[in-house]
């Protein structure tokens, strides 16, 4: 198993990064949060999880080991594959997921695209003894939707856009984010923001 990749970032895309390891470019699927911390040409070290299928080998990358471990634990629940596990980590931090499961917060799980009310109830039951206790203290009075602007802005800067362009793109997708039922999904907003920027260029 490939536990991590380390090297300069060769390229960035809305849902993946290419890290150069020993002269080979390795494509790694990442959440917008992880991508927002990467810069083309700069050194990085990503914790990784290799998912093997009959017709594909996909490497998923994470900012730290905690995220990688949570990603793997989520997949022990029935019906949760790598894409859904990654979507859950795109919306919530590992600690937020642990807190949601520990407190039976169904609403937090249904904020993830692809998880309905019944699915959330099933996941809460299955993951209760697997994810462990939350480590950090919850942010006092922080609204669920807080942070999507910062995450999106950082992701656009990471992809090489100027601050002004990132500001304009965030403003352009704000109505879509505010119309989202629950927590806005940063991955979808990033795609919409990139379309806006491509039309403007």
Image (spheres, rainbow, N blue to C red):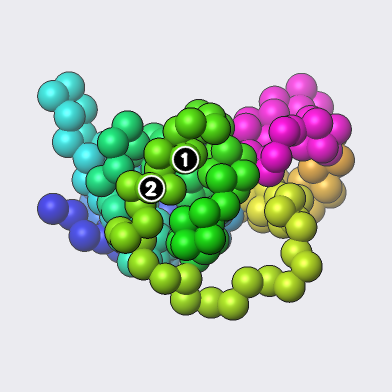
Where, by quadrant of the figure, is residue 117 drawn?
A: top right
Q: Magenta stretch containing residue 175, yes or no?
A: yes
Along the line of sight, the residue nearer the viewer: 161 or 71? 71
**172, above or below 37, in the image:** above
Q: Magenta stretch containing residue 191, yes or no?
A: yes
Look at the image and tell me whether residue 28 can be seen: no
Where, by quadrant of the figure, is residue 174 drawn?
A: top right
Q: In this figure, which residue is indicated by the disc labeled 1? A: 121
Alpha carbons under labels 1 and 2: distance apart: 7 Å
- Disc 1 secondary structure class: helix
Where, by quadrant of the figure, is residue 143 drawn?
A: bottom right
Q: In this figure, which residue is indicated by the disc labeled 2? A: 125
For the point 25% across and 46% down, the residue is 76
Magenta part of the protein: which range? 174-200
> Label 2 near label 1: C-beta < 8 Å?
yes
Image coordinates of residue 111 in percent, x first then y, are: 61, 40
């Amino acid at each position: 198993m490939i536990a991590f990749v380390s090297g300069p970032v060769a390229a960035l895309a809305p849902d993946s990064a290419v890290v150069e390891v020993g002269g080979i470019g390795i494509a790694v699927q990442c959440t917008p949060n992880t991508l927002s911390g990467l810069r083309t040409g700069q050194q990085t070290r990503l914790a990784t999880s290799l998912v093997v299928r009959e017709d594909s080998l996909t490497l998923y990358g994470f900012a730290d080991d905690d995220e990688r471990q949570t990603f793997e634990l989520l997949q022990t629940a029935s019906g949760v594959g790598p894409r859904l596990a990654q979507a859950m980590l795109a919306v919530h931090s590992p600690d937020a997921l642990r807190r949601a499961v520990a407190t039976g917060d169904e609403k937090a799980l249904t904020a993830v695209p692809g998880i309905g009310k019944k699915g959330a109830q099933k996941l809460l039951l299955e993951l209760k003894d697997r994810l462990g206790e939350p480590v950090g203290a919850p942010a006092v009075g922080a609204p669920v939707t807080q942070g999507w602007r910062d995450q999106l802005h950082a992701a656009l800067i990471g992809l090489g856009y100027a601050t002004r362009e990132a500001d304009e793109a965030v403003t352009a997708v704000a109505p879509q984010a505010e119309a989202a039922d629950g927590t806005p999904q940063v991955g979808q907003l990033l795609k919409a923001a990139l379309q806006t920027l491509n039309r403007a260029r």
